[in-house]
Image (tube, rainbow, N blue to C red):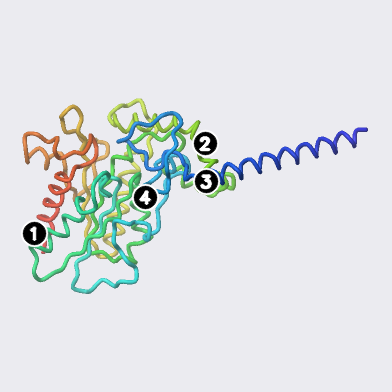
C-alpha cells in the first residue's frame, strides 16, 4: 500500500514537472515570436513601471537590469559597436591610438555617434596635427564602473596597443548595490546555482519577465540612489571609494607597463542648476575636472547636460576640446 502511494506521488511529481516545463516552453516561444522582453534599454531617462514589456530586438540597446541581476561583466571587443575597432585591421605605426573607456557618459547615451567626445576628439586632433594621424576608439559601455574599466584594460590593452587611455568613471561606482557589490559579484560568479540563474536570466525571455516582478523594486532603488548620489542612506555601493581608487591605480599601472599615457575624468553632476562633484570618487592624477571646465565656459551650464548626469552634444564637444589641448601640448 505504501509502495503504491510512493509510486503515485512520484508520478504526480513527474507529471507536474512535465506540465510546468511545457508551459515554460510555450511561453518562451510566444515571447520570442512576439519579440517581448522586460526593461531592455530602459534607463534613467525613461519612466518605468512595476511590470513593463518592451520590444527587445532593437539594435544598440542595453539591458540595465542584467547588471543588477547577474552582476557586471566585461564584454568582448566585438560588441562595442561605437568603437569601430576591427581586430583584423592593423593600426599603422605612424598612427596615434587613443582608447576611451567609461560608462554611458563615454558611450554617449541619447547622443548620435558623431556627437560623442571620442568622435569630436579624433576630428579636432586630426585638424590640428599634420605629422600624426589620430585614431580614437570608443569603448564606453552603459552601466560600467571602474571595476569593469580595470578588467577591460587587463584583457585587451595588449590587443589594442593604445598610445593613450582616457578613463571616465565614478557615476556608477557610487550607485546603490541592491544585492552585491561589484567585488562580491566577481567572487560569487563561479557558484553553480549563480551560473544556472545567470544563464536562465540572460537567455530565457519568459524567465526574465517573471524575475522582473521582484527586480523592478530593486531597479527603482538603484535609480533613486543614482539620482541622488550624495545621499548617505545607500551605504552599500557598487564600488566603494577605496576600491575606486584601487581600480584607477590598477588602470594607471597597466597603462605604464604598456608604455601608454592615461588621463582620468572627474565626473560632474547637475542638480538644481548647480554643478556638483562627488569628492569621495575623485580620480587620481592626472585628471580632468569637468565641473571646473564647465563653470569657466558659460554662465548657464544647463546646455552642457542632456540630463543631470550625461553630457549633451555641446558638453561632449567641450570635453573633447579640453582633452585635445592637453594632448597637443605634449606632442
Occupied quadrant, residue 160 = bottom left
Gap in angstroms between the C-alphas marked 2 and 4: 25 Å
Gap in angstroms between the C-alphas marked 2 and 3: 11 Å
Contact? badges 1 and 3 (CB < 8 Å): no
Crowd rating for badge 1 (residues with CA inside 10 Å; few <14, some 14–19, many 20+): few
Crowd rating for badge 2 (residues with CA inside 10 Å; few <14, some 14–19, many 20+): some
Numbered circle sitting on residue 329: 1
Q: Nearer the viewer, mark 1 or mark 3?
A: 3
Q: Earlier in the sequence, mark 1 or mark 3?
A: 3
Numbered circle sitting on residue 211: 2
Residue 291 image position (x, y, % from top left): 15, 39
Q: Earlier in the sequence, mark 4 or mark 1?
A: 4
Numbered circle sitting on residue 198: 3
Gap in angstroms between the C-alphas marked 1 and 2: 52 Å
Contact? badges 3 and 4 (CB < 8 Å): no
The residue sitting at 18% across, 27% down in the picture is: 272
Amino acid at each position: 500500500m505504501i509502495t503504491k502511494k510512493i509510486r503515485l506521488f512520484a508520478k504526480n511529481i513527474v507529471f507536474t514537472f512535465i506540465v510546468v516545463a511545457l508551459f515554460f516552453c510555450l511561453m518562451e516561444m510566444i515571447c520570442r515570436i512576439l519579440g517581448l522582453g522586460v526593461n531592455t534599454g530602459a534607463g534613467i531617462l525613461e519612466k518605468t513601471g512595476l511590470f513593463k514589456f518592451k520590444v527587445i530586438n532593437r539594435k544598440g540597446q542595453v539591458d540595465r537590469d542584467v547588471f543588477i541581476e547577474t552582476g557586471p561583466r566585461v564584454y568582448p571587443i566585438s560588441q562595442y559597436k561605437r568603437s569601430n575597432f576591427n581586430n583584423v585591421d592593423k593600426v599603422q605605426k605612424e598612427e596615434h591610438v587613443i582608447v576611451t573607456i567609461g560608462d554611458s557618459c563615454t558611450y554617449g547615451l541619447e547622443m548620435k555617434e558623431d556627437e560623442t567626445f571620442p568622435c569630436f576628439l579624433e576630428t579636432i586632433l586630426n585638424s590640428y596635427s599634420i605629422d600624426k594621424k589620430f585614431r580614437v576608439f570608443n569603448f564606453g559601455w552603459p552601466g560600467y564602473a571602474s571595476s569593469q574599466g580595470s578588467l577591460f584594460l587587463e584583457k585587451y590593452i595588449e590587443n589594442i596597443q593604445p598610445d593613450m587611455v582616457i578613463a571616465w568613471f565614478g557615476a556608477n561606482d557610487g550607485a546603490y548595490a541592491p544585492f552585491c557589490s561589484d567585488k562580491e559579484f566577481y567572487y560569487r560568479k563561479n557558484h553553480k546555482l549563480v551560473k544556472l540563474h545567470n544563464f536562465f536570466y540572460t537567455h530565457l525571455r519568459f524567465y526574465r519577465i517573471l524575475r522582473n516582478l521582484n527586480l523592478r523594486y530593486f531597479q527603482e532603488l538603484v535609480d533613486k540612489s543614482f539620482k541622488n548620489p550624495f545621499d548617505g542612506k545607500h551605504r552599500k555601493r557598487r564600488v566603494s571609494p577605496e576600491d575606486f581608487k584601487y581600480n584607477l591605480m590598477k588602470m594607471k599601472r597597466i597603462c605604464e607597463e604598456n608604455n601608454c599615457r592615461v588621463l582620468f575624468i572627474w565626473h560632474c553632476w547637475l542638480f538644481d542648476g548647480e554643478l556638483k562633484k562627488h569628492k569621495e570618487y575623485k580620480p587620481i592624477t592626472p585628471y580632468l575636472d569637468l565641473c571646473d571646465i564647465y563653470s569657466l565656459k558659460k554662465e548657464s551650464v544647463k546646455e552642457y547636460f542632456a540630463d543631470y548626469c550625461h553630457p549633451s552634444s555641446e558638453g561632449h564637444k567641450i570635453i573633447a576640446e579640453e582633452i585635445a589641448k592637453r594632448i597637443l601640448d605634449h606632442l
